[in-house]
Amino acid sequence: MKKHSTYQREPERPQRGFRAKQAAGYLGISVSYFWSLVKDGKIGAGLKVTPRCTLWLRETLDAYLDSLVAA
């Protein structure tokens, strides 16, 4: 007879940081349009994690979407 494990997995946490391609996918837009929004200041510049890696927080992307709804 098999014993059932009492091990509980931690609940998965939603992704917080997105690279440019992932952020564009999250917003449902192209990567080039995402970069134009960053250039125009409609989305913040992101967090420079390393010299070659910039992340945008989910909260920043959600704030941009909220601004579209409020407009």
Image (tube, grey):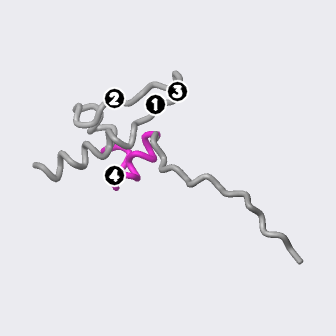
**Sequence-first tag of 4 and 2:** 4
Which mark lies nearer to you, 3 or 4?
Answer: 4
Hey, which quadrant is residue 40 in on the image?
Answer: top left
> What's under tag 2, amino acid-wise?
Ala
**Sequence-first tag of 3 and 4:** 4
The CA span between labels 4 and 2 is 16 Å
Q: Position of residue 30 (x, y in %)?
A: 35, 50
Image height of 65 relative to 1, above or below: above
Which residue is the site of mark 3? 52
Task: Give the magenta part as a residue range.
Answer: 19-33
The CA span between labels 1 and 2 is 8 Å
Which residue is the site of mark 4? 27
42 or 8: nearer the viewer:
8
Hey, which quadrant is residue 47 in on the image?
Answer: top left
Residue for point 30% across, 46% down: 62
14 or 7: nearer the viewer:
7
Which mark lies nearer to you, 1 or 3?
Answer: 1
Q: Secondary structure at mark 3?
A: loop
Residue for point 56% across, 54% down: 11
Q: Please, which residue is most extreme toward the bottom here?
A: 1
Quarter placement of the N terminus: bottom right
Hey, which quadrant is residue 39 in on the image?
Answer: top left
Q: Secondary structure at mark 4?
A: helix
Residue 54 disc label: 1
- Residue 54 located within the stretch drawn in magenta: no
> Label 2: few (<14), some or many (≥20) within 10 Å?
some
**Sequence-first tag of 1 and 4:** 4
Residue for point 48% across, 47% down: 15
Residue for point 39% across, 38% down: 57
Q: Main secondary structure of the magenta part?
A: helix
- Mark 1 and mark 2 in contact? Answer it, CB < 8 Å: yes
